[in-house]
Image (cartoon, helix red, strand yellow):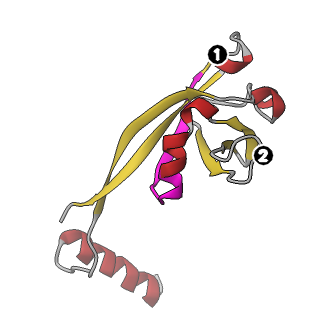
């Protein structure tokens, strides 16, 4: 083991044991479920053609599209860097406000219903990530 690795391991062990305190607080996260929703527009993007690749709990990214010509509150949904659809217009205002306000959100696939109509094939959950100090 070289000196740098030994030094890093020693500092980590001291910090973990409580003998060495760094100048930052530990953060704990709490997920607050905000919304379960189906994905709009699966048939127009990469949703339908990738449905066999989706898995329950796969993370999806929510990306604002403020210049969308159909909806200024539009929020696109991406899976593995592929746009698969949108949060339905009827449900996007609060999520849009949270994203625009810098809130930390997490979203994932909750249900996959291959036999259902296009509008009901994929459901996602959206969570607000609340961070707080534990010190």
- Mark 1 closeness class: few <14, some 14–19, many ≥20 residues within 10 Å: few
- Mark 2 closeness class: few <14, some 14–19, many ≥20 residues within 10 Å: few
Which mark is nearer the camera, 1 or 2?
2
Magenta segment includes 110 = yes
Which numbered circle lies on residue 69? Answer: 2
Pinpoint residue 87: horizontal percent, then vertical percent: 62, 35
Q: Secondary structure at mark 2?
A: loop
Pinpoint residue 1: horizontal percent, then vertical percent: 46, 81
Segment tinted magenta in the rendering: 98-111
The residue at 76%/31% (across/down) is 47
> Viewer-proximal residue, 90 or 135?
90
Using residue 100 as the reference point, say whether residue 77 is left or right of it.
right
* Quadrant including the C terminus: bottom left
Q: From what the image shows, is residue 98 above or below residue 1?
A: above
The number of discs equals 2
Q: Which residue is mark 1?
A: 113
Pinpoint residue 55: horizontal percent, then vertical percent: 62, 30
Using residue 22 as the reference point, say whether residue 69 is left or right of it.
right
Magenta segment includes 63 = no
């Amino acid at each position: 083991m070289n000196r740098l690795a030994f030094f890093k391991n020693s500092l980590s062990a001291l910090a973990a044991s409580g003998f060495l305190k760094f100048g930052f607080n530990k953060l704990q996260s709490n997920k607050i479920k905000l919304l379960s929703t189906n994905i709009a527009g699966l048939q127009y993007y990469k949703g339908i053609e990738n449905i066999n690749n989706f898995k329950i709990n796969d993370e999806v990214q929510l990306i604002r599209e403020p210049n969308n010509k159909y909806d200024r509150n539009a929020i696109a949904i991406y899976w593995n860097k592929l746009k698969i659809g949108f949060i339905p217009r009827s449900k996007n205002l609060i999520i849009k406000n949270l994203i625009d306000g810098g809130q930390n959100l997490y979203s994932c696939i909750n249900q996959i219903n291959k036999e259902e109509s296009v509008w009901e094939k994929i459901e996602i959950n959206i969570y607000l990530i609340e961070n707080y100090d534990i010190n």
